[in-house]
Image: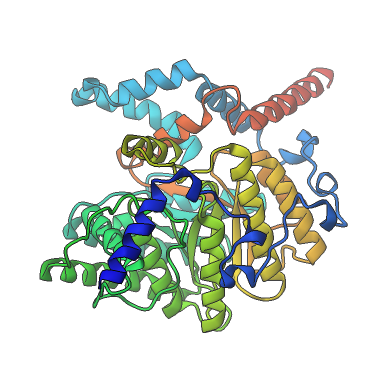
């Protein structure tokens, strides 16, 4: 036991030492399990691809990109994106939403109605499945698929979790009534199925088990690797108490909820995508995801997909460890690769504790990590192992992945590879990838306006400023609108 505790102390100490938390390159990792697989790096000059990224995706042809989009829709979209890019407007809007004005019934109704007709309509698929169905049909008409996300995020008790479960089950059932193949995934947040307080407890216990091999978790199910040695452990600095009987019962209920959704998706042959969260509860999210992956991903047909956030310094190692373990078990691993959405809060927490941030130090390092992970998974898919969703608004990553996929012979007919962007964002990239012959989905959050507000506030934060992710869309939409105006004037 003393040896185990000393091991814990040394691992905790590494979290407080900047010299010990340097992120390893994939091809220089010392772990035998990691060194066994060496993914290509898109930027490696010695491994150039035959296809050139610019020749595959043409983002200069605004007419071709937005050919199927009505002029009124282009005008509305460009206006809303332009408004969302104005920092002062976004700051005022966020102040209003968090102010006491929302406590006045009449003002609240007026404000929510205005949001519903503008930002909600642009970034969300609807408030109910009837509206979502119309949105999915419109996307399907222009060659895009939909990922259905019932937009409830954080549940505080079992009663709320049970109510959310019914909504998720109804979403799967409703998807079956939409045009065949128009829905690529149903999206679930484990935070809607398991109380946040319990997710934090699960994460603490899993961290301590990793740091102390003598620490026993009798409730733990079979899973894939959740941590690497470079993962952040500073959330759990003292030994957590074992679960109480009530906590074990609550965990059992949460597992049952997720299993019911997984089974529903399995029976419907409709993949389930589990979203990621911040590092305080992500270990619990991965635990739920990987235990379900082992149970439901059968016959080289991934039904359950997890989410990997490439802005985390340990993401490359964790991907390789999970993939190698899944391959050994004969389980096809499904992964959605994103950059990440909690950078500000993650850095703020790490700073307050006096530890190094789990986020890459520079945006270039995040880009490199994303491209490395994408390259690795594309190689795996080309060899028939696993499946990948490349969720990105980054044009360069989209072009590089498209070029590599083309060289590997992976196209639209491949059911294990697709791109994805958020609804209302990066439409030019979505249409460009679609035109290049790849499967593309749009992430479609839906639900009552009040319920979707956390999501809308995050989108507002992402889009404000001249360097926002929507800058290219605004530019190309205005270019196409000017072209249409000239043509209508001439005729």
Q: Quadrant of the C terminus?
A: top right
Q: Position of residue 9 (x, y in %)?
A: 32, 58
Q: Position of residue 401 (x, y in %)?
A: 72, 54
> Is 136 placed left or right of 457 in the picture?
right
- Asked if one can make out residue 238 in the rendered structure from this viewpoint, the answer is yes
Residue beneath the point at 45% across and 70% down? 225
Front residue of this view, candidates 322 and 13: 13
Q: Position of residue 158 (x, y in %)?
A: 18, 60
Outermost residue to the left = 245
Front residue of this view, candidates 159 and 338: 338
Outermost residue to the right = 50
User: Relative to 298, is 283 above or below?
Assistant: above
User: Relative to 286, is 141 above or below?
Assistant: above
Residue beneath the point at 58% across and 54% down? 24
**Residue 2 image-quadrant placement:** bottom left
- Asked if one can make out residue 183 in the rendered structure from this viewpoint, the answer is no
> Is 199 placed left or right of 467 in the picture?
left
Q: Quadrant of the N terminus?
A: bottom left
**Residue 284 image-quadrant placement:** bottom left
Front residue of this view, candidates 31 and 449: 31
Total tally of numbered discs in the picture? 0
> Is 459 placed left or right of 449 in the picture?
right
The colour scheme used to paint the residues is rainbow
> Is 159 placed left or right of 20 in the picture?
left
**Residue 88 image-quadrant placement:** top left
Residue beneath the point at 31% across and 55% down? 191
Residue beneath the point at 34% across and 39% down? 349
Q: Position of residue 43 (x, y in %)?
A: 76, 49
């Amino acid at each position: 036991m003393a040896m185990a505790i000393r091991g814990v102390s040394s691992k905790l100490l590494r979290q407080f030492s900047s010299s010990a938390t340097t992120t390893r390159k994939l091809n220089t990792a010392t772990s035998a399990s990691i060194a066994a697989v060496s993914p290509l790096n898109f930027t490696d000059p010695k491994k150039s691809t035959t296809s050139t990224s610019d020749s595959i995706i043409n983002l200069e042809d605004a007419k071709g990109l937005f050919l199927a989009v009505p002029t009124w829709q282009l005008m509305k979209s460009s206006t809303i994106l332009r408004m969302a890019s104005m920092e002062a407007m976004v700051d005022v809007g966020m102040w209003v939403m968090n102010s006491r004005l929302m406590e006045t019934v009449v003002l609240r109704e007026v404000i929510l109605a205005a949001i519903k007709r503008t930002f909600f309509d642009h970034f969300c698929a609807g408030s109910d499945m009837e509206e979502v169905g119309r949105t999915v049909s419109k996307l399907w008409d222009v060659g895009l698929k939909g990922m259905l996300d019932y937009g409830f995020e954080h549940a505080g008790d079992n009663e709320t979790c049970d109510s959310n479960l019914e909504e998720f089950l109804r979403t799967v059932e409703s998807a079956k009534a939409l045009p065949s193949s128009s829905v690529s995934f149903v999206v679930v947040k484990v935070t809607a199925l398991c109380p946040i307080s319990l997710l934090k407890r699960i994460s603490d216990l899993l961290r301590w088990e990793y740091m102390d091999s003598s620490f026993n978790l009798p409730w733990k199910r079979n899973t894939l690797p959740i941590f690497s040695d470079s993962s952040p452990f500073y959330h759990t600095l003292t030994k957590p108490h074992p679960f109480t009987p009530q906590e074990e019962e609550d965990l059992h209920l949460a597992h049952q909820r997720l299993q019911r959704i997984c089974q529903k998706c399995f029976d419907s042959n409709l993949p389930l995508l589990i979203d990621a969260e911040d590092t305080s509860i992500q270990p619990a999210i991965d635990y739920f995801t990987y235990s379900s992956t082992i149970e439901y991903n059968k016959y080289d047909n991934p039904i359950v997909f997890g989410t990997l956030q490439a802005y985390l310094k340990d993401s490359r190692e964790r991907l390789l460890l999970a993939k190698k373990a899944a391959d050994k078990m004969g389980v096809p691993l499904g992964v959605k690769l994103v950059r990440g959405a909690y950078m500000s809060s993650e850095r703020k927490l790490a700073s307050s504790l006096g530890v190094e941030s789990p986020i890459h130090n520079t945006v270039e390092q995040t880009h490199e990590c994303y491209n490395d992970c994408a390259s690795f998974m594309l190689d795996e898919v080309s060899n028939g192992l696993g499946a990948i969703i490349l969720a990105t608004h980054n044009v360069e990553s989209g072009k590089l992945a498209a070029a590599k996929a083309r060289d590997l012979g992976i196209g639209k007919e491949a059911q294990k590879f697709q791109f994805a962007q958020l609804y209302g964002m990066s439409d030019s990239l979505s249409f460009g990838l679609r035109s290049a012959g790849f499967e593309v989905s749009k992430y479609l959050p839906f639900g009552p306006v009040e319920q979707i507000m956390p999501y809308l506030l995050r989108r507002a934060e992402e889009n404000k400023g001249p360097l926002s992710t929507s800058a290219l869309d605004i530019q190309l939409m205005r270019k196409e609108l000017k072209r249409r105006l000239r043509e209508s004037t001439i005729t």
